[in-house]
Structure formats: structure tokens, C-alpha cells
Amino acid sequence: MLYSPKPMHIPDGFLSVAVAIILWIVAIAVIAYALKRAGKELGERQAPLMGVLAACIFAGQMLNFSVAGGTSGHLLGAALATILLGPWPAVLVLTCVVSAQALLFQDGGLLAMGGNIVNMAIVGVFVAHFTSSTIQRLAGGRRWGLAVRGFSAGWLSIFVAALACALELALSGTSPANVAVPAMGGIHALIGIGEGLITLGALAFIAAARPDLVQQGASPRGGSRLVWGGGLLIAVLLAIASPLASTHPDGLEWVAGQQGFLNLQQGPLYRIMPDYVFPGLSNQALATIVAGIVGALLVAGVAFAVAYTRRSRRVET
């Protein structure tokens, strides 16, 4: 069945103004520090990788996969970005993705965007970083270490980010904590399995093609054009497949419907490409594909520009 992806992030109306403002302050502070740290950590050849990862994660998030219980999940990508780039560049990659989704595709509210950045680009990334680093030390360079890191970091990044979202809903008075936490935790424990498997598979593919890229914090060895070309091709292929995404509601939407607060969702203030549909195209599948390709290329460009700017400043000093 052809499908146009629905909004999958916190919309305006689910969070109180006070909670949303606090989360915006946290997001801005962490992003500012991430820009500073990324300037010290990014190697000369890592800027293309940031752009490619942003494009792939953006396109991958359009592909919802079915989960038991009549709901669906989608890639977060925090674990993948963290393992390949380190935590601070990963924060910037996920911030670029989440921001583009809200500003261009009306996926997640503008007031709630700070909360979405905190949950996905900060909580998700640092849970993945802690998990991956811990397992890496325990594995001691053994081959199984990368697979366990990928799956565990992927699963935990989804699960803990969902719990953070549940607590934000509770603090906002949207849903009591004793309802929101088990509901969000339960469904995202299942969704996290998909995230873990996708992360594991992606890392296995990358390790076979470019083993230097899975060494956390290491600078890639040459082949930047191959990274660019291959990565963007994958992002385009994911966008082309996006109309085949699951028709079931995503985890947050499902919980909101089950717990009776879905009607609190507020519509966007403006519309550019809402629901990932490119305007002016009558064929919905084609409109979704074009929107996905345009979005992936824009996100790649922004992430590359951020990386290049930070890298340039580091080199100049």
C-alpha cells in the first residue's frame, strides 16, 4: 500500500509552554557547546560523512516499519551517527534532521521542536554514546563488539528517548506519569528492536565496505567522493522506497490515541511540504519521493556546511 509519511515527532499542543521553553533552553545550550566541541573533534575528511549521515537518517526516518499491536516505528539514527562520528558531531547531525523536518515538512511543532531536539539529538545520542563506549571497553577489540554496540546502543537510544518524552508529557499535564511512562516505554521497547537491528545491519555493511569508518573518532582514510556518492545514493534509494512505509501510526501517535490526548495536537502555522508531500504533484507516491529526495539533499547540505565551517575554524587556529 502506498503511503505518505505522517508527522512522527511531538506536535505543538502536547507540551505545556513552560516545559517547551525549558527544553528549548536546554537544546540551545547543548547545540552551542556541540558546535564548540565539534570544531575540535572533526577531522578534515569527516565533513562529507556528516552530510551523508544526515541525508541517510532523514530518508531512513521516512520509512516507518510495522510493530506488533497496530503501530509502527521509524529509524532514529542516533546510535549510528554516534558510533561513526562521536557524540558531539552526532548531536549536530540529528539537530539538522529534526530542524528540517519541523521547518520544511511540518513534522513536529515549532514550539515543541526544542523537546524533539532534546529527546532525539541529545538524549538519544548520549545514551547511545554511553552504551557504545561501555561495550567497546568490555569487548576489548573483539569482533562481536561492534555488533553488540550497534544493537544495544540503538535499542537503548529509542527506549530512553521515549521515556524522556513520557516524562515531558507528564510534566506538561498531558498524561499522568503512571500512564505515559509504561505506555511509551512498552511500545518503544518493541520499536527499539527494529532500531537495533537496522543499526547493526548498517554498521555491518559499513564495516565490510569501509572499516575505517567504524573506528569511533577516527578520521576516514581517503575516498571522500566514494563516501559522498555511495551515501547519497543510499539516501535517494530510501526516499524512493518511502511510499511503501507502514500505514500504522507511529509510537507516540498510537499512545496519544490510546490515552485520549491526540486531540490536543495543534496544526502547523504554515505549510511548505506537510506530510512529506511535494506540492504541485498529483501523484502522491511521486510527491512523497520528490519531497524525500529534496529533503535529504537539503539536510546533507546544511550538515556539510556546519561541519565544514567548524572544521575550517579548527584548521585556521
Image (cartoon, rainbow, N blue to C red):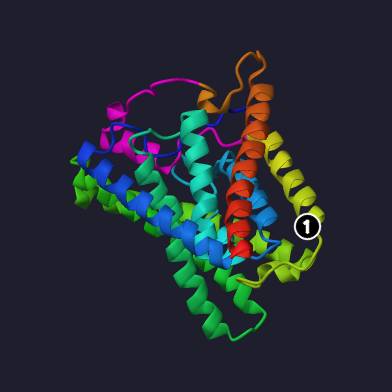
Which residue in the structure is indicated by mark 1?
A: 224
In this orientation, does residue 214 appear?
yes
Q: Residue 62 placed where, x, y %?
A: 58, 38
What amino acid is at disc 1?
Ser
What residue is at 53 percent from the left and 83 percent from the top?
A: 137
In this orientation, does residue 1 appear?
no
Q: Residue 94 placed where, x, y %?
A: 51, 50
Q: What's drawn in magenta, residue-wise?
A: 243-271
What residue is at 48 percent from the left and 78 percent from the top?
A: 134
Task: Choose top left, top right, bottom left or bottom right for residue 316.
Answer: bottom right
- Within-10-Å neighbours for mark 1: few <14, some 14–19, many 20+: some
Q: Residue 174 placed where, x, y %?
A: 22, 39
Return the residue nearer the eye: 91 or 183. Answer: 91
Whether 18 is drawn above or below 194: the answer is above
Q: Residue 70 placed where, x, y %?
A: 46, 39
Q: Quadrant of the C terminus?
A: bottom right
